[in-house]
Image (cartoon, grey):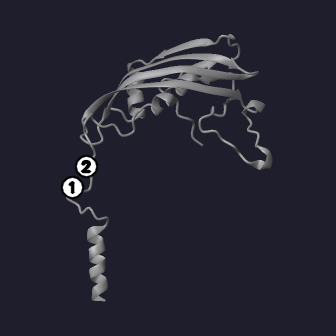
Amino acid sequence: MTAPVKSPVSFRVSVVRLPKKGMPVSLDAGPEQLAALAREHHLLEAKRFHADLVVSPWKRDGVAVSGMVEGDIVQECVVTLEPIEAHVEENISAVFVPEGSKLGRFEAASGGEMVLDPDGPDMPESFSGTAIDVGALAEEFFALGIDPYPRKQGIEMPTMADAGESDRPLGTLAEKLAALKRKS
């Protein structure tokens, strides 16, 4: 079993004694961290990474993390391969409970059916020990905001018709198969 990969912007926060109003956490990535983020997320460059978070107690022994992560990145256009600058901005909302906590268990509805609301809150994540890596959490949400197929403005993907191919699906192959069938 391999050890989990540490986030380039890892920042562990002790959750032993959190203020009721929450503890603010602000993260800014340095040059080395930005270079590591660019490598990790296959970017040409990560220019800025900033997260403003609040770590608060949740119910009896859980922890809620909320806030925002934003950054400026440079990606490669999937059509022209030219560099494209983009801004990433994502809201962060997550709940953590200690391993084995009753708050982390899912109670099945009567009849053993599992009912999930796609628009509802996520299930709490479990953590062990006395700290949570809020930097890694911010990086996860940052990654969600990165466009997986960036295109330069005004550029469209070429279609098969643009490449001179027949509009009929499998046109050439279908014709060759029909000709083979006639010969036999």
Residue 172 to residue 11: above or below: below
Query: Which quarter of the picture shows residue 61?
Result: top right
- Can residue 161 be seen? yes
As helix, strand or loop, the secondary structure at mark 2 comes to loop
Query: Which sits in the foreground, 33 or 50?
Result: 50
Query: Which sits in the foreground, 80 or 43?
Result: 80
Residue 97 tag number: none
What residue is drawn where x is 61% and y is 27%? Answer: 94
What residue is drawn where x is 24% and y is 40%? Answer: 80
Residue 158 tag number: 2
Horizontal placement of 168 versus 41: left or right? left
Residues packed near mark 1 inside 10 Å, few (<14), some (14 to 19) or many (20 plus): few
- Please state the horizontal and vertical placement of residue 85, each as a whole percent of the image: 30, 27
What residue is drawn where x is 66% and y is 34%? Answer: 123
Q: How many marks?
A: 2
| Comes first in the chain, label 1 or label 2 | 2
> CB of mark 1 within 8 Å of CB of mark 2?
yes
As helix, strand or loop, the secondary structure at mark 1 comes to loop
Kindly identify which residue carries mark 1: 163
- Please state the horizontal and vertical placement of residue 71, each as a whole percent of the image: 40, 22
- Please state the horizontal and vertical placement of residue 174, each as a whole percent of the image: 30, 73
Query: Which quarter of the picture shows residue 19?
Result: top right
Q: Amino acid at mark 2?
A: Pro
Q: Amino acid at mark 1?
A: Ala
- Can residue 101 be seen? no
Horizontal placement of 38 versus 178: left or right? right
